[in-house]
Image (tube, helix red, strand yellow):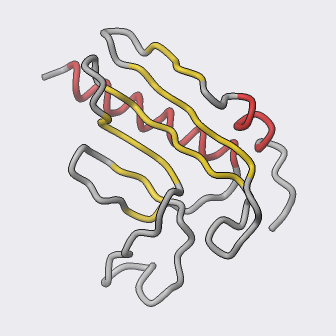
Amino acid sequence: MREDHGIANLLDLHDQIIDQDGGYWVKIEAWRVEVTADVPHGVRYSLTLHEPYGKRILGYDNAHAVKPPKKFKYAGQRMTYDHKHRHVSDKGVPYEFQDAQQLLIDFFNEVDRVLKETTQK
């Protein structure tokens, strides 16, 4: 895996809680771990969006493996632990970790989408 200069930025955000207006908030956790086949970038992370009463409504993390969809490009592949939870009851779908900067971009784009959908209801 190539060197990821965005890892330092992600690690610097560890334990940050970021207000998203309307009572919604983002929590970021990230710390170094040993590089393994499951965590090839050497960082454990959890990026979550919460509704005003604290319930998680979106999450990107690598805390556990997820079963890939059988009909799609992940079928039959060994998966790293990187995945996302698109809604409260979602058990997770694979997320293709490219680098830490792209992870943050993808997460905050998804936060914007979810907040837009949530506040339009």
Q: Quadrant of the C terminus?
A: top left
Q: Nearer the viewer, residue 3 or 41?
A: 41
- Which residue is depicted at the point 59% across and 46% down? 45
Number of marks drawn: 0
Q: Where is residue 13 in the image (x, y as percent from the top left)?
A: 67, 28
Residue with the most extreme front position: 34
Q: Position of residue 71 (x, y in %)?
A: 31, 83
- In the displayed orientation, state which residue is furthest to the bottom: 76
- Is residue 2 left or right of 75 when viewed as pictured? right
Image coords of residue 51 (percent x, y): 28, 24
Which residue is painted at 52% across and 20% down in the image?
17
Quarter residue 91 falls in: bottom left
Q: Position of residue 116 (x, y in %)?
A: 30, 24
Q: Which residue is drawn at 44% across and 90% down?
A: 76
Which residue is painted at 46% across and 69% down in the image? Answer: 65
Q: State left or right for residue 78 relative to residue 111.
A: right
For the residue pair 58 and 105, the one nearer the viewer reads as 58
| Left or right placement of residue 107 versus residue 2 in this view | left
Residue 3 shown left or right of residue 97 in the figure: right
**The N terminus appears in which quarter of the rendering?**
bottom right
Relative to 31, say whether 40 is above or below. below
Residue projecting furthest to the top: 22
17, above or below 5, in the image = above
